[in-house]
């Protein structure tokens, strides 16, 4: 089993905090790109989010490893102030992520509605069934 030395843990925790901030910034960029209808910017932001998320996962796994038992210096936990900042940044990121997820969900629903309306505007007709005379009616799918 691999063990981690405390100074490395604090460096990893500092990088983790920095990446949380970077991921938050990317979520905000993505939301602005959606609002501005800027697909290339949105795609760039998605790619950056994936990179940050992958690195955050690696750091989280490293920080979860046990400390070396045979070194006295390694028993020092991650700095309390740093842990507090990470918790605050993590909570803030979770709130922003919920907003981002809702925006994506509602954007998807709006897009589906627009596609449906455009399809209807192209002149899809439905015929009446049964013994009545067949006539054409304009339909709008919702």
Image (tube, rainbow, N blue to C red):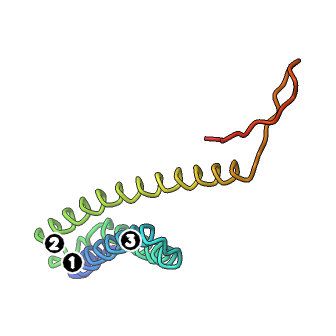
Q: Residue lying furthest top in this view?
A: 131
| Mark nearer the N terminus (2 vs 1) | 1
Residue at screen point 84% across, 25% down: 129
Position above or below: 70 against 101: below
Q: Residues within 10 Å of mark 3 (few under 14, many from 20)?
A: some
| Mark nearer the N terminus (3 vs 1) | 1
C-beta proximity under 8 Å, tags 3 and 2:
no
Q: Quadrant of the N terminus?
A: bottom left
C-beta proximity under 8 Å, tags 2 and 1:
yes
- Secondary structure at numbered mark 1: helix
Residue at screen point 39% across, 67% down: 31
Q: Which mark is residue 32?
A: 3
Q: Nearer the viewer, mark 2 or mark 1?
A: 2
Percent position of residue 120, x then y: 69, 48
Q: Quadrant of residue 9?
A: bottom left
From the viewer's perspective, is 62 left or right of 121?
A: left
For the image shown, how many numbered marks are present on the structure? 3
Which residue, given by chain and number where applicable, does mark 1 sit on?
A: 10
Which residue, given by chain and number where applicable, does mark 2 sit on?
A: 82
Position above or below: 128 against 111: above
Q: CA distance from mark 3 to mark 2?
A: 30 Å
Percent position of residue 96, x then y: 31, 60
Q: CA distance from mark 3 to mark 1?
A: 33 Å
Q: CA distance from mark 2 to mark 1?
A: 8 Å
Residue at screen point 25% across, 74% down: 17
Position above or below: 63 against 114: below
């Amino acid at each position: 089993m691999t063990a981690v030395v405390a100074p490395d843990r604090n460096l990893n925790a500092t990088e983790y905090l920095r990446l949380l901030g970077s991921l938050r910034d990317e979520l905000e960029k993505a939301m602005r790109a959606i609002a501005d209808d800027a697909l290339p910017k949105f795609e760039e932001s998605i790619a950056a989010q994936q990179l940050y998320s992958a690195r955050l996962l690696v750091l989280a796994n490293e920080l979860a490893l046990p400390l070396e038992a045979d070194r006295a210096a390694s028993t020092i936990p991650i700095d309390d102030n740093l842990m507090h900042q990470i918790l605050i940044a993590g909570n803030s990121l979770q709130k922003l992520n919920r907003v981002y997820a809702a925006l994506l969900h509602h954007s998807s629903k709006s897009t589906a509605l627009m596609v449906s309306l455009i399809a209807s505007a192209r002149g899809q007709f439905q015929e009446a069934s049964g013994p009545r005379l067949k006539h054409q009616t304009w339909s709008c799918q919702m």
